[in-house]
Amino acid sequence: MATDPPKVLIIGSGIAGLSAAIHFGEFSDVTVLTKSSADEGNTRYAQGGIAGVWSKNDSFEEHKKDTLAAGAGLCRESAVDICIEEGPDRIRELINWGVEFTRDPSSPNDYDLHREGGHHQRRILHAHDFTGLAIEETLIKKAKSNPRIRILENRMAVDLIMEGKLDPKPNTRELGRCLGAYSLDTTTNEITPIAADLTVIAGGGAGKVYLYTSNPDVATGDGIAMAHRAGARVANLEFMQFHPTCLYHPAAKNFLITEALRGEGAVLRNLNGHDFMRDHHEMGSLAPRYVVSQAIDLELKRSGAPHVWLDLSSMDESYFKTHFPQVQSMCEKFGIHPPRDYIPVVPAAHYLCGGILVDDWAQTSVPGLLAIGEAACTGLHGANRLASNSLLEGVVYSKRAAVRAKATLTSQELPKPPRPLPAWEFGRAVDMEEQIDIVATWREIRTLMWNYVGIVRSDRRLNRARERLALLRHEVNEDYWKFKVNRDLIELRNLLTVSELIVECAIRRKESRGLHLNVDYPTQIPEEAHDTII
Ligand code: FAD
Ligand code: SIN
């Protein structure tokens, strides 16, 4: 008797979601929901590259040592071993699928390897300085070549559909298995249920929680908020990584100045021209990212200056132009001409090291729900991510997710979701007449998070943030049930949830470690070397 092929639902079309789609597409029907165009997300803006042991001078041990040092005592060693040891094969897979990494001009059979903060070796493969775009375009093409994979653009996952909500059991609040998700067509505002044997969250990070960020607009932490509502465990959300060098210019929205420049000799200077990173770390401007961001924050607070400088003057002009064409054209757009001119830079929220807690096979604590990419917390990054380890984690865990799920998905015992799933209930919700509440609350949350839960924290500021967010929660929840939902309202609610989770994790950590710096507990405490799990 013929059986239906397994159905996999993937939320997100960045490096994690698309590479998972390609692997799952070998044995399942795959639907990818993506809330904007398929190529929009953090992946396409990645500049520096993907880290992997590639050169003869490098070794797994050295990459591991740098990852553990950056992670400040909180990395899960199994995750570090997995990513570092499986990474080169996944990078080769990307190359076979068509990604053209920049080659070494002096030895064209080899790839040009860059170096970034915290790395003691050159191990970063890159496509000039638009690595993310090169990867994203290749993955979209590859996924679209498989008729079993459908990518639905402008479709936003609203919430996961949980068995326990459809068929509540007496005396228990267990939500049971994930059966798929409700999907909003953002062009018509219609909501439809999508049933799946397995749902994979690949919704990316949450940089938009902060006023200043390197992330694009889609990064509102939807996947993390949805998983939390579904009862999944989330962890280590206090570790928001602030990238030290985003372009400081009133008209430049979100533009990152890649750390690879510092790997090639660029130096940070304060407005007096002093190489201040030498006062903070033996690696100077190439210290691990949190050390650099915290030092810049201190410098800005101490001097009252609006930015620091990135000095590229030691770099040959033609080298700069061939290796960093994107940085060059963006700076020139704003009248800055490196390497001759210094670039004005400031830190901005960049990468969420915590997320939905998963095991070594991307399984969450909820049956039928996996999580991969920036939305997941695998344990690789610990308290601070080593530069260019994120694209790596995305490809490694998307493959693992498919490998482990294959046996279950292709077995006859797979519990099938009840079909059809119930339609979305609009109840008595009415159309929203004006957007002003959403816009104002959105800005309030992001400003509050920047000011009270930023690079340097204190108990007083964290508690104040918690109280204010709780007030906002009442208002946002009221609107959520009163009005017909649209993308803005859903994102606002998710942004608020993730902000509250970040604050909660930050309050629970009674020490300073890696990216979490609390002036009331200024040191690292060995007994606190554990995950913060909610
Ligand atoms: P993303 O690429 O962010 O994709 C998330 C996807 O989910 C998007 O398609 C989004 O639209 C979709 N989505 C979100 N919510 C929903 C929803 N509710 N419904 C449907 N779809 C949804 N890392 C490195 O390793 N090396 C680098 O050089 C590097 N440079 C970076 C530069 C910049 C400017 C930025 C912002 C990040 C950089 N990073 C880098 C980090 C890295 O790019 C990201 O962590 C990684 O790309 C995340 O991949 P992802 O697939 O998990 O998420
Ligand atoms: C960068 O190019 O500086 C970003 C690298 C990263 O976030 O890993």
Image (cartoon, rainbow, N blue to C red):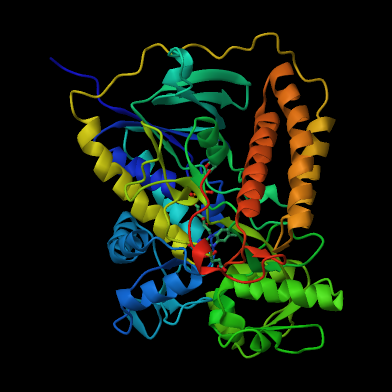
Which residue occupies the foreground of this view, 324 or 114?
Answer: 114
Image position, residue 42 (x, y; %): 56, 52
Residue at x 73% of width, y 44% of height: 466
Vertical side of 327 occupied by 150: above or below: above
Front-lying residue, 362 or 148:
362
Which of the 4 image quadrants contains residue 82? bottom left
Q: Which sits in the foreground, 263 or 279? A: 279
Q: Position of residue 118 (x, y in %)?
A: 50, 77
Q: Quadrant of the N terminus?
A: top left
Left or right of 487, for residue 357: left
What is the quadrant of residue 89 in the picture?
Answer: bottom left
Residue 122 shown left or right of residue 516 in the figure: left
Which residue appears at 47% of the width and 68% of the height? Answer: 73
Question: In the shown orientation, is residue 475 left or right of residue 410?
Answer: right
Whether residue 446 appears in this view of the structure is no
- Comparing 34 with 79, the one in front is 79
